[in-house]
Image: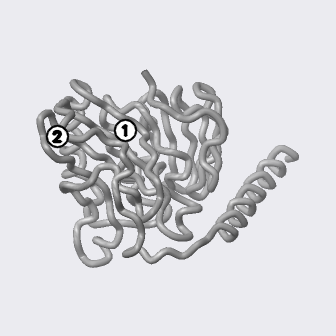
Amino acid sequence: MEKSRLFTLFIIGTALAGLGLAVYNYRPVKWWQADRSSAGLAPDPAEYKQAVVQVYAARTINWKGWFAVHSWIAVKPENADFYTTYQVMGYRVFRGGNAVLIGPDIPDRRWFGAEPDLIQDLRGEAAARAIPRIDELAKNYYYQHTYQLWPGPNSNSFIAHIIRHTPELTVELPPTAIGKDWIDNGKLFARSESGSGVQFSLFGIFGLTVGLAEGIEIDFLGLTFGIDFYRPALKLPFFGRIGMKDAPLP
């Protein structure tokens, strides 16, 4: 009983601290005025001819950014002179369109002023193998016309789905990627995103993930609490990782 009380107090304390941080740092931004330029993280396709696959995440716009990130994937086949990005955009569903947006774009755009974090960077043969699979998964995504900010499926659910089913991608999304624990088609069990463990999730509201890359993660109301043992770090809502920077498995 005492342990359960301590855990409850820990969750409440983390939530209150994160909420206080969000309120203190909140600065409203007009989305049409926000920076959407390149962050300089992707190789220039005019100079780099090999295939490239990059997974990105960046804090969302305005107050939501203190709670969650938006994630996307950018690909460039061998000898291609532009990048194609894959992501889910909620506003498209609200207007009666398709949730999945696929098209040429700047791969490493700042997300309405937020700096993107490069989660995984594949080059050469590994990227070339992954690109057809990514394209197939995106075009056949089950939730083409569905979007729910919480608990999912949302933009992070989509990218987690692609990572989970692309063997060359061996990383997991950050703890602030709310919606990542929504398993395909509402299933209860699956491989973890990195493929190095297993995951249980009750529609993204409560779950448990255990894996070499993920360590131990508890999902509670869409918020992730965990410990990464492989690259030691705490995983917390609002704050993300506290410790070593994450990296894909070798």
Image check: 6 left or right of 223?
right
Choose between 182 and 215: the one closer to the eye. Answer: 215
Location of the C terminus (image quadrant): top left
Residue sitting nearer the eye, 184 or 244: 244
Q: CA distance from mark 1 to mark 2?
A: 31 Å
| Residue at which label 1 appears | 164
Q: Amino acid at mark 2?
A: Ala
Assess disc 2: are there few (<14), some (14-19) or many (≥20) residues with their C-alpha within 10 Å of its C-alpha. few
Relative to residue 136, is residue 122 depicted above or below? above
Query: Can see residue 153?
Result: no
View extreme (top): residue: 250
Q: Earlier in the sequence, mark 1 or mark 2?
A: 2
In x, y percent, where is residue 28?
A: 54, 76
The answer to whether 163 is drawn above or below residue 204 in the figure is above
Q: What residue appears at the point 46 percent right and 46 percent down from the top-left corner?
A: 117
Amino acid type, mark 1: Arg
Q: 208 or 229: nearer the eye? A: 229
- Identify the residue position indicated by label 2 in the image: 46
* CB contact under 8 Å: marks 1 and 2: no
Instruction: Name the mark on residue 64.
Output: none
Badge 1 crowding class, 10 Å Cα cut-off, few under 14, some 14 to 19, many 20 or more, is: many
- Work out which residue is located at the far right of the displayed protein and give it: 2
Q: Residue 120, image x and y in percent? A: 39, 36
User: What SS does tag 2 mark?
Assistant: loop
Q: Residue at position x 28%, y 46% from top?
A: 74
Q: Is residue 226 left or right of residue 64?
A: right
Q: Quadrant of residue 231?
A: top right
- Whether 131 is drawn above or below 28: the answer is above
Please indicate, yes or no, whether residue 38 appears anywhere in the rendered image. Answer: yes
